[in-house]
Image (cartoon, coloured by chain):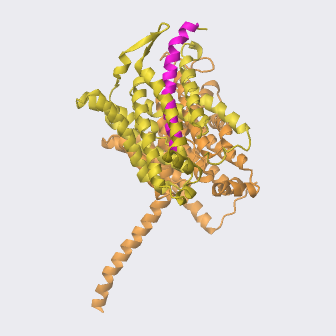
Chain colours: A orange, B yellow
Amino acid sequence: MWIPRLDAGDRVRAGVISLLLAFVVIVLPQLLSGYWVTVCTSVAIYAIVALGLGILMGRTGLVSLGQIALLALAAWVGARLFFATNLPFPIVLLGSGLITMVLGTLVGLPALRLSGLYLALITLMLAGAITVVLRTTNFPNGGHGFLGHTETDRGAASIRRPAIANGDTAYLRYAILVAALMFLLALIHVRAKPGRAWAAIRQSESAALAAGVNVTLYKMWAFALASFLTGVAGGLLAADSGQLFITTFPTSDSITLLAVVLMGGIYSLWGAVVAGLLMQLLPALLNNWGVAADWLTIVFGAGVLQVLLTAPQGLAYQFPHDMARLGRFIAGRVGRARAPARERAG
Amino acid sequence: MPSWEDFKPFIVTGLALGGVYALSGVGMVVLYRATGVLNLAFGAVGAMGALLSWQLINHNGWAEGPAFLFCVLFGGAITLLYGVIFGPPLASRDPLVKATATLGLALILLGIMDLVWSDKARSMILPTSNHGFEVSRVFVNYTEVIAIAFGLAVMVVTALFLRFTKTGTAMRALANDREITATLGVPVRRVEAAAWLGSGLLSGAAGLLLSNLVGLDAATLTFLVISSLAATLIGRLRSITVTFFAAIVIGLVNALITPILSISQYRDMTPFVLATIALLVLSGRRGSALSGRAG
C-alpha cells in the first residue's frame, strides 16, 4: 500500500491546491453565465483526456494519435451503460473507464512490444477505424438492441445526469470534482512504483530493462491508465452533451489534442489543465470575439514545432519561469533607475 | 453473396487506389530511410496542392496543365522547405519526435485549408477521367490507368535509383548511420534535401490523383494517408517492394468489399485491420530488427 510521505513543501502545495480547487468548485460556477458553464465543463473533461495523453508521452515516451477516437468509443460505452442500466452515476463512469481501458489496451498490445513509432501509427489507424464504425452504428439514444440507436426523433432520449447534479452549474462542479479525483489518481501513480518505472523507461529502455524493470508491463500499465482516464472522461462527456454525434469527434481533433498537450507541457500534471483550457476555452473565446477558430489550428501547429525545437517542457513550466525572469528584469530596471537618483541625493 | 460480375468494376477501382497508396507509401519509406522522418503531413501537403490547383483553375483562369503541374511542384516545394528548416535541428532526435513534428506542419496546413476552402463541396476532374476503354464490359478510365502505372513505375524507378545511383547509395548509407556517412564525405544535407524534394513531389502527385479518384476535401485527403501508412508499416518502414504490394492489397480489399452489403460500410477499416494483423505476425517474431530504428 502506498503511504504518502509529505514534506513541508508538499504540505504547502497541497494546501494551495485545495484552496484553488475549493475556489473553482464553489465560487467559479456562480460567476459564470450559461454558455461559459458548458465551456468550463468541456475544459474539465478534456483536461482528463489530456492528462491521459500527457502521462503516456511525458512519463513513458509513448505517443498515441487516437485519443479523441478513444474518447468517442468511451462516450459510446458510457451512453450504452446509462441507457441499459439504472446503476448509480459514479459506477457507470467507473464501468466506462474500465471497459475503455480493456479495449484500448487490447489494441495497443501488439504495438507496445515494438518501437514507439509503431504505436503512434497503429493508434492513428485505430482513430480512423473507430470513426468508420461509429459513423455506421451511431451513438445510443435510447433505442433497442445492442447498438441502442433509433433513427426516429421521437424515440431519442437524453443521456441522464447524476441526480445531485442535473443542472448545468451543478454538473460543472461534479465534472471538476471527478477531474480532481483523476488527477489525484495520476499523481499517486507518478509518485509510486509505476512512476519510477516509467521514469526509468523514458530515460533509456535498455537501462530500465537491465535494472529489472518489466518494460512491457509498465508501458502497458501507462497505456491502460491513459485509456481508463479517457474512458471516465467519455462517460462524463456523454452525460454532459445528452446526445452524441460522431461529428463531435473528428480525427483531426486527436492531432489537435496532441498539439495542446505538448504545448501545455507533458512533464507536469498542470500541463493537462493548460491543455484543456487551450483546446476548449480558447476556441470559445475566439468565437465570442468573432474570429474563426481555424486560426487556432495554425497556431497549434506552429506550437508543436516550437515546443519540440526549443521548449520541451511546455507552457506549464515555461510560463512561470518567463514571468519570474520578467519580474527580475523589471526589478533590475527599476533598481538601476533608482540607484543614480540615490547617488545624486547622497 | 454478390456474383463475380458485381466485383469486376471494383477491381479496377481498387488497383487504382492501391497504386496511389503505393506511390505515397514509397515516397514515405524513401524519406524515412534517408532522413529518419516519417512524414505524417504527406496527405495534408497533397490535399493543399490539389485545392490550390482547383483555386487556380476556377478562380485565376489557369489552364489545367500548368495548374496540375503547380500542384506537384507545390508538394515538392513545401516539403523541401520543411525539410531544410526543421530537418537539421531535429536530426539527432528520436524518430518518434521527428514524426510528431511533421504533425505540426499537418495542423498548419489543415488550419489554412479549413480557413480558405471549407465553405462548400468541390470537385476536380482530370481530363483523363473522361476517356477510357472497356475490358470485359468494365469501363476503365485513363486516370485509373495512370494511377496503377505510376504507382508501379515509382516503385521500380525508386528501387533502381537506390540501387544504382550515387545519391541513392548515399541515401541507403544514411539509413544505416548518419554520423559515419557524414564522416565518409557524403554531403548529408544535400542528399537529405533530395529525399525531401522527391518525397514532396510524390505527395503532390498523390494528392492530385486522389482528389480525382476519391474527392476534393481537405480532411478526407489528409487522412487517406492512413492507408499508405498501413502499407509502410507492413513493409516495416523499410522495404519498398513489400510496401508496394501491401498498398495494392489494401486498395483492392477496400474496394472489393464494397458490393458485400453486410460489411460494406466498414470497408474503410481495411488499413487498420491489415496493419494490426501484420503487427501481430511481426511482433510474434522475436528478435527482429523492429524494436530499434528500422533501417
Numbered label tally: 0
* Residue A240 appears in the figure: no
What is the x, y in percent for residue A27? 47, 51
**Vertical arrangement, residue B25 with respect to residue B254, above or below:** below
**Vertical arrangement, residue B113 with respect to residue A142, above or below:** below
User: As drawn, which residue projects farthest toward the left?
Assistant: B61
What is the x, y in percent for residue A260? 47, 47
What is the x, y in percent for residue B39? 49, 42
Identify the image quadrant of residue B210. Answer: top left
Within the magenta stretch, is there residue B26? Answer: yes
User: In the displayed structure, does residue B167 sit left or right of residue B76?
Assistant: right
What is the x, y in percent for residue B150? 46, 28
The residue drawn where x is 39% and y is 48% is B81
**Vertical arrangement, residue A1 with respect to residue B118, above or below:** below
Looking at the figure, which quarter contains the N terminus of chain B?
top right
Within the magenta stretch, is there residue A71? Answer: no
Viewer-proximal residue among B195 and A214: B195
> Magenta segment, which residues?
B3-31
